[in-house]
Amino acid sequence: MTTDARYVQIAALSTLLVLEIWAFDLGATPLQALVTVGTALVVQAASCRATGTPFDWRSPLVTGLSLSLLLRSADPLSWVAAAAVGIGSKFLLRIGGKHVFNPACFAIVAMLATGQVWVSPGLWGNATWLALMVAGFGGLVLARSSRLDIALAFLASYGALLLGRCLWLGDPLTIPAHQMQSGALLIFSLFMITDPRSTPDSRSGRMVFAFAVAAIGYHLQFRWQVREGLFYALAAVSLATPLIDRWRPSARFAWSGTREA
């Protein structure tokens, strides 16, 4: 029996969180992680009970870990709210049985609107070895959940846009290389835009989806100076997933052996 890819994803995100807390001084704390992950699990359990859906701890744990890595706030209530909003979106915002948004992305966008949180921008900076470790973990996860294509399409599109901007401005090539090593970008690329429950079912649809997110996110970041542009872009393009699925219908993804909300 094939191991659920989320186990590998949880191992990868947990490893990164431990390194961020104890090896790098980047703002994450054990308390924030405990509150965020705990809230995600509690809200998932309560929502499953209310809807008669079997409880599955793996997806809310992935959401809680992702928020612990990316989201920052000095207010503990914001940690609770982010996890609750993200998990709640899975149950309240659905079309055709699919999530409209990736839960962590929706939580980040919603909480940014409050002005009480921010996204950790660079995370591990130039720690290339750590970036490669994330990429290795993520590649394994995505290969097992048939979403490696959307990650590669997004990274290729976004990287090409950064390279084109660099050449246009006459900047050194080290600038786009440094931008592509961002820990936040890698987590976004490997564990967020690749969510099989909120992305198009067909491969061709996922290619269109990935390019649209890269193009809109790039425009927001460099034309409008919106640092969190990729998260806004993913949330916006996710609204088009039902239309893409109708345009390019394909088999619906489901985690093996589960009936998850």
Image: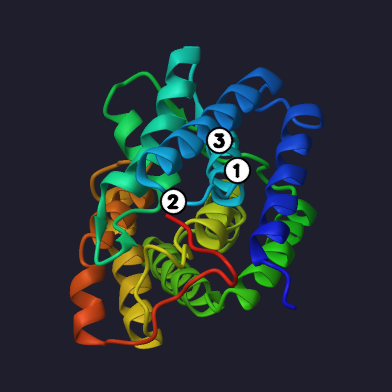
Q: Is residue 41 visible?
A: yes
Residue 182 horizontal side relative to residue 102, left or right:
right
Based on the displayed image, in which of its 4 quarters is residue 144 positioned?
bottom right
User: Is tag 1's residue or tag 2's residue first in the polypeptide sequence?
Assistant: 2
Q: Is residue 145 shown above or below 238?
A: below
Residue shown at 32% from the left, 50% from the top: 222
User: Is tag 3's residue or tag 1's residue first in the polypeptide sequence?
Assistant: 3
User: Pointer 2: what residue?
Assistant: 53
Q: Which dot, 1 or 2, sits closer to the camera?
A: 2
Q: Position of residue 166 (x, y in %)?
A: 44, 63
User: Pointer 1: what residue?
Assistant: 61
Q: Position of residue 7 (x, y in %)?
A: 71, 58
Residue 180 horizontal side relative to residue 8, left or right:
left
Q: Secondary structure at mark 3?
A: helix
Q: Secondary structure at mark 1?
A: helix
Q: Residues within 10 Å of mark 3 (few under 14, many from 20)?
A: many
Residue nearest the observer in this picture, 35 or 153: 35
- Asked if labels 1 and 3 touch by Cβ distance under 8 angstroms, the answer is yes
Question: Which disc number belongs to residue 46?
Answer: none
Q: Residues within 10 Å of mark 2 (few under 14, many from 20)?
A: some
Residue shown at 48% from the left, 56% from the top: 192
User: Is tag 3's residue or tag 2's residue first in the polypeptide sequence?
Assistant: 3
- Asked if labels 2 and 3 touch by Cβ distance under 8 angstroms, the answer is no
Distance from the alpha carbon under mark 3 to that under mark 1: 7 Å
Which amino acid type corresponds to the residue marked 1 in the rendered image? Leu
Q: Which dot, 3 or 1, sits closer to the camera?
A: 3
Q: Position of residue 25 (x, y in %)?
A: 72, 25
- Asked if labels 2 and 1 touch by Cβ distance under 8 angstroms, the answer is no
Q: Is residue 23 shown above or below 94?
A: above
User: Pointer 3: what residue?
Assistant: 41
Which amino acid type corresponds to the residue marked 3 in the rendered image? Leu
